[in-house]
Image (spheres, coloured by chain):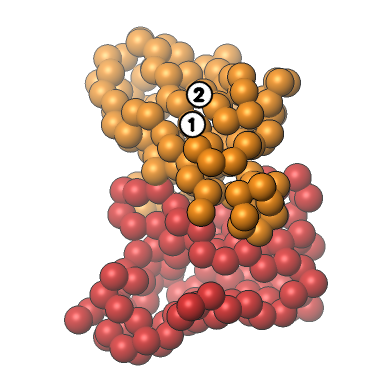
Chain colours: A red, B orange
Amino acid sequence: SQQGEEDPQALSIQEGENATMNCSYKTSINNLQWYRQNSGRGLVHLILIRSNEREKHSGRLRVTLDTSKKSSSLLITASRAADTASYFCATDDSGYSTLTFGKGTMLLVSP
Amino acid sequence: GAVVSQHPSRVICKSGTSVKIECRSLDFQATTMFWYRQFPKQSLMLMATSNEGSKATYEQGVEKDKFLINHASLTLSTLTVTSAHPEDSSFYICSARDLGTSGGARDTQYFGPGTRLTVL
C-alpha cells in the first residue's frame, strides 16, 4: 500500500529558485529515502535519512525528518533546468528494506 | 558509487511468450534485491523481494507462477514474465539493497535503469 504521500504533486519554478517537496507517511519507519526519476528512466538515489536523524545535507539538497509529525521535506536550492524530474520519497517501515513509495512530485525547472 | 544494471533495457514480444529480465549489482554484493513495476505517470509498486539462495517473497496480488524470480548469486537476480499478455506491458525496475559494502549508506537501495516491456 502507498505510505508516503508527496506534495505538491507538481511544482513549476524558475532556474535559481528553491524547490521544496514534502512527504508524509503513516507508520513508524526505519529510514526514509528520496529518489529522482527522469522520464522513462530508473531511479537515482539522493539521500537516506534514518529515523533518529533530523536533517541531512548533500550538495544542494537538504532533507529534514520530523518523526513526531511523520513527515519529511526535500529542499533543492538554486535549482537548475537539469533538476527537472519526478521526485519520490520511500519509507522503509519493515526493517527489512522493503520500500513503500509515494506518488511523487513532478518538478519542472524553467530556464 | 553503487551501480545496478538491467538487461534488456527494452523488449517487445508477442503475446504468450516468456521474457527474462536480468538485474545485476556491479560493484557490491546484494543478498536482497527487489522487483517493482511502474505504469505511466504512476509510482513504483513493489512486486517481490528476491533473496539470494531462497525463494522470493511476493506482494499480495502478484502471481508467483507468472512472475518467476531467481536470485542465483549475490550479484544477479532474474525476473521471468511467463506467457506474457498485453496487460503485462509495463516498466519493470529492480533494486539492490546495499549492506554498506559499496561505500554508501547502509540499507540504501540502488535502482537499475529499468526495462520497458511491450507485449503485442
**Whole-percent x, y for residue B4 in the image:** 48, 41
Question: Where is B82 relative to A76, above or below?
Answer: above
**Whole-percent x, y for residue B78 in the image:** 51, 23
Question: A92 left or right of B72?
Answer: right
Question: Where is B41 relative to B15, above or below?
Answer: below
Residue drawn 40% across the image and 13% down it: B18
Residue placed under numbered mark 2 in the picture = B79
Residue placed under numbered mark 1 in the picture = B23
Residue drawn 63% across the image and 29% down it: B74
Q: Nearer the viewer, mark 2 or mark 1?
A: 1
Residue B117 appears in the rendering: no
Q: Secondary structure at mark 2?
A: strand
Question: A2 left or right of B4?
Answer: right
**Whole-percent x, y for residue B68 in the image:** 55, 18
Question: A23 left or right of A52?
Answer: left
Q: Farthest residue in the bottom direction?
A: A17
Chain ID at mark 2: B
Classify 10 Å Cα crowding around label 1: few (below 14), some (14-19), many (20 and above): many
Asked whether disc 2 touches disc 1, contact meaning CB atoms under 8 Å apart, the reply is yes
| Kind of residue sitting beneath label 1 | Cys
Q: Secondary structure at mark 1?
A: strand
Give the Cα distance between marks 2 and 1.
Answer: 8 Å
* Image quadrant containing the C terminus of chain A: bottom left
On the same chain, marks 2 and 1? The answer is: yes
| Kind of residue sitting beneath label 2 | Leu
Q: In terms of sequence position, does the residue under pointer 2 or pointer 1 come before the other?
A: 1
- Residue in front for this viewpoint, A102 or A96: A96
Residue drawn 61% across the image and 19% down it: B72
- Residue in front for this viewpoint, A107 or A55: A55
